[in-house]
Image: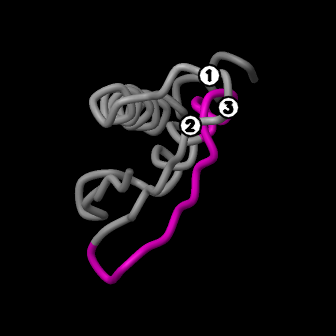
Amino acid sequence: MIITIPKDIYPKIAVLKAAYHFTDKAYIYIQQSDTDYLINYKPKVDCDSISADEFTNELLSQAVRYMIYNQTKDVRKLITM
C-alpha cells in the first residue's frame, strides 16, 4: 500500500519517526516527489497489517512532538545550564 504525505504539512523527521515506529510490523520504503513523501509499506509475515489510518495518526503524533520540541528547546537549554 502507498500513502502520500504532503511535504508542506509534515516535516521529514516526523515522517521518518512515524515510519520507524512500524518497522516491527512492516517493510517500509520512503520516496519523495517535488511535493510529497511516498510511503510504501508491506506487512511482514506473521504480523498484523497496519492501516493507512494508523500510520497517519502516528505521523500526526510525531509532527506535534517535533513542533513542541522546537517551541521548548530554548527553555530546556536554560533549565539544564
> Which residue is labeled 3 in the image?
45
Is residue 26 or residue 60 the one in the foreground? 26
Is residue 9 or residue 59 the one in the foreground? 59
Magenta span of residues:
20-35
In space, the residues marked 1 and 2 are separated at their CA atoms by 7 Å
Give residue 8's mark.
none
User: As shown in the figure, which amino acid type bears the numbered disc 2?
Assistant: Pro
User: As shown in the figure, which amino acid type bears the numbered disc 1?
Assistant: Cys
Q: Are marks 3 and 1 in contact (CB under 8 Å)?
A: yes
Q: Is residue 64 magenta?
A: no
In space, the residues marked 2 and 3 are separated at their CA atoms by 7 Å
Most extreme residue toward the bottom, as rendered?
34
Q: Are marks 2 and 3 in contact (CB under 8 Å)?
A: yes
Give residue 43's mark.
2
> Which residue is labeled 1 in the image?
47
Element under label 2? strand
